[in-house]
Image (tube, rainbow, N blue to C red):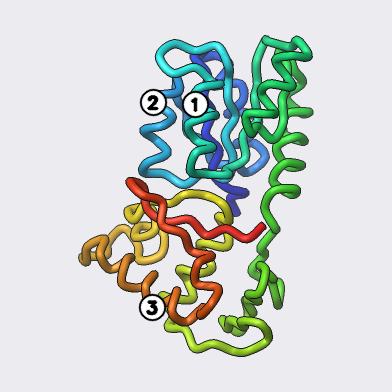
Amino acid sequence: MSKGNVLIVDDEADMRRLVRLYLEKEGFRCMEAEDGQVALDLLKSNTFELIILDVMMPNVDGLTFCMKVREYSSVPIIFLTARGDEWDRVYGLKLGADDYIVKPFSPNELVARVDAVLRRVHPVIRDEEDNVTFGPIVLNLKGRQVYLEDELINLTLKEYELLLFFCRHNGQALSREQLLENVWGFDYVGGVRTVDTHIKTLRLKLKQHGNLIQTVWGIGYKFEVA
């Protein structure tokens, strides 16, 4: 079973390959980008659990990329860079990075840091668990039931799967295309307006907590529980 998707952003191809080798060995799926602009384009059509980011890159550098992403998403970001001064570390963390690793580095330590950030940032949802809580929402995974403030709410199968996908990616901005592909499947023949319709009804069923599903203008939607 995959541990999730990781985006590796670095202008050095050898570095990207090294990081990818170790992460894929540990069960992650990886995509690569040679600069921040390519990475921003990938974020429009792909869902990532974590981003590993270099600082010094052409076109859009790592610091600018981090600032742009933090305007709409809280996807975990780990800086992996040769810039190891205290000021660089502090500035990177202030921009919204979740960790900062200086090159040269131990690949095994990097994998451990990735696991640690994901445990800290995202609640782990395992299919064999009974109940998972997100604020006022409790998902019963085995029974495919959802409770809102201890009251069972009636969701269709697709509404349940949509809410579960949101919870698995808490804090991440997701495009309509991403939601359509991951919840309905690549072979679904309907359009992206299907996503809007289901989110509208899901918000209504979540009552006063419907605002947990936020509209991210120009991108799609984001579910966020602190």
Which numbered disc flags the more N-terminal residue, 1 or 2? 2
At horizontal 52% and vertical 49% (from top left) the residue drawn is 172
The C terminus appears in which quarter of the rendering?
bottom right
Q: Which mark is residue 126?
A: none
Residue 124: percent from the left, percent from the top?
Answer: 69, 58
Question: From the viewer's perspective, is residue 134 above or below residue 57?
Answer: below
Label 2 neighbour load within 10 Å: few <14, some 14-19, many 20+ = some
Label 3 neighbour load within 10 Å: few <14, some 14-19, many 20+ = some
Q: Which mark is residue 65?
A: 1
Residue 47: percent from the left, percent from the top?
Answer: 47, 47
The N terminus appears in which quarter of the rendering?
bottom right
Query: Which amino acid does the dot numbered 3 rest on?
Result: Thr
Report, in whole angstroms, how far the alpha carbon at label 1 lies from the one at label 3. 34 Å
Q: Nearer the viewer, residue 84 or 218?
A: 218
Residue marked by disc 3: 201
Q: Which mark is residue 38?
A: 2
Query: Which amino acid does the dot numbered 2 rest on?
Result: Val
In this view, the mark in front (1 or 2): 1
Which numbered disc flags the more N-terminal residue, 1 or 3? 1
